[in-house]
């Protein structure tokens, strides 16, 4: 096993490239935007940040306003069903409500490439499963709902 290294953003980019993980950088934030979940229905963005405490991988899901109460009631179960993730609501006045899904990894002595890729892979996979579950429960905002078409729910 390779010894842990002090992680840098450049090192993370190199490791993601070596693993064939598609990502991009923007001028708006310090995050590495991961494309793996961005084509998933309801996903706004998925980003990887290097913070003082370690790694933070967040995925924001856009919620239907009418589903806000149901999602709020379901937060406990979602957090129990996805123990490697932190799931919480983000509601602000001038935007649709969001379900924020976060995975974090504390870095004390450092990290090696395999540990980094394992964290990214597991977190993306769990976030994708959670997004699919939310889609199935009709929690997520969609273009169909925006157009005023029938929702698959009976009530």
Image (cartoon, rainbow, N blue to C red):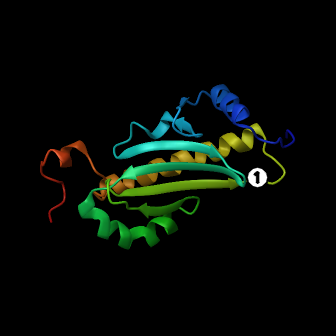
Q: Is residue 80 left or right of residue 111?
A: left
At x 45%, y 40%, the residue is 37
Q: Which quadrant of the figure has residue 113?
A: top right
Vertical position of residue 8 compared to residue 99: above or below: above
| Picture coordinates of residue 120, whole percent (x, y) | 61, 43
Within 10 angstroms of label 1, few (less than 14), some, or many (20 or more) residues?
some
Q: Quadrant of the C terminus?
A: bottom left
Residue drawn at point x = 83 percent, y = 41 percent:
5
Find residue 29 and report its horizontal and vertical position in percent.
Answer: 55, 40
User: In which quadrant of the rendered image does the N terminus lie?
Assistant: top right
Q: Position of residue 78 (x, y in %)?
A: 45, 65
Q: Residue furthest left?
A: 149
User: Could you tell me which residue is drawn at 48 percent across and 34 percent down?
Assistant: 35
Q: Secondary structure at mark 1?
A: loop
Q: Residue at x 55, y 58 (%)?
A: 85
The image shows residue 111, relative to residue 21, as above or below, that is: below
Nearest the eye: 114 or 39:
39
Nearest the viewer among 122 and 30 is: 30
153 relative to 10, above or below: below
Q: Position of residue 79 (x, y in %)?
A: 50, 66
In the image, 153 versus 55, the foreground residue is 55
Number of marks: 1
Q: Quadrant of residue 16?
A: top right
| Residue occupied by mark 1 | 107
């Amino acid at each position: 096993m390779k010894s842990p290294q002090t992680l840098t953003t450049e090192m993370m980019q190199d490791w993601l490239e070596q693993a064939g993980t598609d990502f991009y950088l923007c001028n708006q934030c310090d995050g590495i935007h991961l494309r793996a979940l961005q084509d998933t229905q309801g996903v706004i963005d998925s980003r990887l940040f290097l913070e003082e405490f370690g790694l933070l991988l967040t995925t924001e899901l856009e919620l239907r306003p009418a589903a806000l109460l149901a999602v709020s009631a379901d937060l406990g179960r979602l957090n129990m069903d996805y123990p490697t993730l932190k799931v919480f609501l983000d509601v602000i006045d001038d935007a649709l409500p969001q379900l924020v899904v976060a995975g974090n990894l504390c870095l004390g002595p450092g990290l090696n490439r395999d540990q980094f890729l394992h964290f990214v892979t597991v977190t993306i996979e769990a976030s994708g499963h959670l997004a699919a579950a939310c889609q199935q429960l009709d929690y997520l905002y969609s273009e169909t709902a925006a157009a005023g078409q029938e929702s698959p729910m009976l009530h």
